[in-house]
Image (cartoon, grey):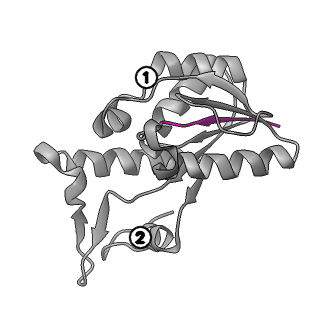
Amino acid sequence: MRLLYLLNVSNASQLSADSGFTVAELLSRAFLDCGVEVTVASPVPVSDARAQYLPMPSPPTKYRARFEPGMDDLLAAIRAAHPDVVVANQIEAAPAVRAALLEARIDAQVVGYCHYLPFFFTEDRQLTVDPAMDNAGLGRPVMLAFAAGLAACDRVLVHSATAASGLRRRPPGWAWT
C-alpha cells in the first residue's frame, strides 16, 4: 500500500511545537513499521529516513491553509506518489485532494486529520464560531470549509477525545451520517 501524507507545517522553526508534524512523525513511523510505503509532501521531512520526501510549501497563513491548498503542488504530489491513501493534515484541503485525485485519475481513500475544531458548542448546544478563526468575520466560512472537508473524507483521524466528542455532538435537528 502507498500512502501520501500531505503535511502543512505552521511552525518550521520549532517542529516540536507543531502538533500536525508531531502526529505525522508518529503515524508515518507506525505505517512504515507495518510495511506501508509512505511519502510525506511537506516543507520539512519527517525524521524516519524510510519515508520518501516530496518538498511542498506550506501556505503562509492559517486562512490560506484552509482556502487555498496549492492545487498545482497538490496535484504534482499525488501524481508522483500515486497513492492508495492520502492523509490531509489540513482537513479543509480534503475537497481539493478529492478533486486532484479525480484529475490525476487515481482512486485513493481520503483521510482527514482533525487537529482542532473551528467551533464549539455552548452549554445549551448552540454552535459557536471559535474566535481564533474569526478574523474579519471568516469564522463561518472556516466552519463551512471544515464541514466540506469532513464530507470529502472517507475517514477522519482526531487528536483527542474532546475533538471526537465535538464531532459527534450536534445542535437539535442536525444529523451526521
Magenta residue span: 1-8
| Numbered label tally | 2
Residue closer to the observer: 142 or 101? 142
Q: Which residue is drawn at 47% across and 48% down?
A: 18
Q: Is residue 3 left or right of residue 137?
A: right
- On whether residue 115 falls in the magenta region, the answer is no
- The main secondary structure of the magenta stretch is strand
Q: Report the residue marked by disc 2.
A: 166
Residue closer to the observer: 134 or 108? 134
Q: Report the residue marked by disc 1.
A: 70
- Residue type at numbered disc 2: Gly
Query: Picture coordinates of residue 87 (x, y %)?
Result: 61, 41
Q: Which residue is drawn at 54% across and 51% down?
A: 113
Q: Residue at x 32, y 57 (%)?
A: 118
Write down the quadrant of residue 148 in the picture. top left
- Please tell me whether mark 1 sits on a helix, a strand or a loop: loop
Among the two numbered marks 1 and 2 on one chain, the one whose residue lies closer to the N terminus:
1
